[in-house]
Image (cartoon, helix red, strand yellow):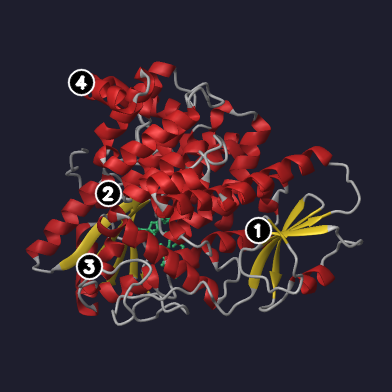
Amino acid sequence: MTPSIACPVKCRPHPRLAPQPPAPSLELLAARGAPAAGELRASRSPPYLSLSRSADSFESRAPCLGSASARRARAAVALGGDGQSAALIAGAQSRHAIFSDELVRRAFAAAEAAHRGQVRASGDPYLQHCVETAALLAELGAGPAVVAAGLLHDTVDDAGLGYGFISEHFGAGVADLVKGVSKLSHLSKLARRNDTASRIDEADRLRIIFLAMEDARAVLIKLADRLHNMRTLDSLPKNKQQSFAKETLEIFAPLANQLGILNWKEQLENLCFKYLCPDKFDELSTSLTEFYNRDLIAAATRRLEQALQVRGLSYYAIYGRHKSLYSIYSKMARKKLVMDEIYDIHGVRVILENKADCFAALEIIHHLWPRIPGKFKDYINSPKPNRYQSLHTVVLTEETLPLEIQIRTRDMHLQAEFGIAAHWRYKEVAARSCCTSVSEMVEWVRWVITWHCQTLNTDHPSSLARDASSKETHTIPSHSDACLSSYSKQCDHKGPVLVILLENEKMSVQEIPQHWTIVDLLNRSSNSGMPLRLRLNSHVVHNWNQELKMGDVLELIPSTPCKCRGYTREFHQKFDHRLAVSQS
Ligand SMILES: Nc1nc2c(ncn2[C@@H]2O[C@H](COP(=O)(O)OP(=O)(O)OP(=O)(O)O)[C@@H](O)[C@H]2O)c(=O)[nH]1
Ligand SMILES: Nc1ncnc2c1ncn2[C@@H]1O[C@H](COP(=O)(O)OP(=O)(O)OP(=O)(O)O)[C@@H](O)[C@H]1O
């Protein structure tokens, strides 16, 4: 912890003139992605990089598990796996109790058997990826079905397990989740092949299709899968790194944002940044050491809490965050600023009872620290057009670094988190249009996810919404309509329908009016000759007049052979396999 500095803050120069001592060199090395092997195990990335903020890799935890050797042995016997997989489950159990759940243990055993002998590009056992994906879900507080599906998520596509097998042994719920992830993986692969991420409109539409999935939890599992893949991207060739990073930045990071999983969003963005702009990433992470203080937020929060208590001002929450490297980079690029012009690298938020308390807190804050002129904004008396309300001020802390403080009431906070002014909208809708039905869908998905993931409910003040209003528990999806905290599912929304068209090995995400049939779409589509056959969601189409629904995948099989036969064959094999799976 940085000791508080007694010097009068008024005489402290601007950070540009009084640079902070650089962060420890180990961290810098880690930040640049070039640590020696031993250092990598010993160090963590600096928090501002947020490359793996809350989950240590298994490797870095394994050495601490000596005392768990008995548990490992028991696991090996019980699961019939080898020593390596026994160590994997023991490692996971030491991190998350849910890995001792009976369903999860059985899922681990099935994944172990299915992936036995398979290795990742890094040479690591494939099973390790399944465990890390499931561990990310466990960190969010997901329940046994989601964690089990996380373990099994690749067993259909990559290890030939059938839907029937998973359903029989783990129940239809887990099997549907695995099938959902498999569908998402398939679409994502097509998107990478077709470079969908480069076409912003199509990337947006694809994300909407993901959100419209039958069960939002499949998206959560796919995100965890992608986050672990991004963390281990070093083992892939450069072109694949680029294509994964591009797709992640355009599709998966915004999805994580829409779902409200900001920690994952930041990690994904930072990793994409590292692979897409390595030089800029290195340059900015080096510069940031001058403007970054790990302990500043905790110290400022404590100081503010004490001051509010002394004045007898009660508050709902005080918390802070370090701005992520990618967010800093984006703001610099967007506003054409240099780093020392970014005043919210360190930010604190105070949530109070009413307006008068907000202004009283503002006064206290300005007594604690000198304000930076020109940075005060009163969005309480002058709300933004989207009804966003808050007081913003920037002060100079003892560490001679600027600190942005946002002050708002609980109602204003709910509006800023969940309402029209919700942060995800504020971030994305400014650039792209977003219809009401999509917003409703996002609300629904966020709600489903937070309902299912304990930590999303409890460790962030956004949960103020539910803490205060959810008096009783309801089950998904039959959440009671009478309950005030209820959202109703809006996937059958009134907006346009989005479907995926596969035509001559090219994928496009098409927007069509409601009630359009296959024939309507064919009439509009660019294909010249009539296709010999059509498949809709892997099934041969007999009735071309049937209506298309949100997320449908329509495949046009060309009448004449085309150049990319290998791909066609592979594609059909996949579809035939999926057909067999869905019929089994
Ligand atoms: N949820 C939500 N947050 C907002 C909105 N507008 C501003 N904010 C928050 O307030 C911060 C600063 O906003 P402003 O004070 O308007 O700042 P600015 O003019 O964009 O730029 P800087 O002062 O350079 O940060 C943002 O970084 C957000 O965290 C909004 O409409 N919705
Ligand atoms: N002062 C603050 N205190 C606490 N949380 C904050 C503060 N400012 C922003 N946040 C939250 O931090 C998360 C990440 O925000 P980030 O800084 O990347 O974007 P932003 O605040 O919208 O900034 P900008 O648009 O200025 O780049 C969001 O959830 C945001 O609500």
Q: Amino acid at mark 2?
A: Ile
Look at the numbered disc 2 and give the secondary structure of its residue: helix
Disc with the residue nearer the chain's start (1 vs 4): 4
Q: Amino acid at mark 4?
A: Ala
Residues marked 3 and 1 touching at CB (< 8 Å): no
Q: Position of residue 462 (x, y in %)?
A: 31, 63
**Label 1: how many residues lie within 10 Å, few (<14), some (14-19) or many (20+)?**
some
Q: Position of residue 8 (x, y in %)?
A: 20, 49
Q: Amino acid at mark 1?
A: Asn
Disc with the residue nearer the chain's start (3 vs 1): 3
Q: Which residue is mark 3?
A: 467
Please name which of the two marks, 3 or 1, marks the residue nearer to the observer.
Answer: 1
Looking at the image, is 496 positioned above or below residue 462? below
Q: Which residue is mark 2?
A: 297
**Label 2: how many residues lie within 10 Å, few (<14), some (14-19) or many (20+)?**
some
Please name which of the two marks, 3 or 2, marks the residue nearer to the observer.
Answer: 3
Please name which of the two marks, 1 or 4, marks the residue nearer to the observer.
Answer: 1
**Label 4: how many residues lie within 10 Å, few (<14), some (14-19) or many (20+)?**
few
Look at the numbered disc 4 and give the secondary structure of its residue: helix
Q: Amino acid at mark 3?
A: Asp
Tell me the distance, in whole angstroms, between the alpha carbons under discs 1 and 4. 48 Å
Ligand 1 - quadrant of the structure image: bottom left
The yes-or-no answer for disc 4 within 8 Å of ligand 2 is no
Disc on res. 70? 4
- Residue 162 is left or right of residue 241, and the answer is left
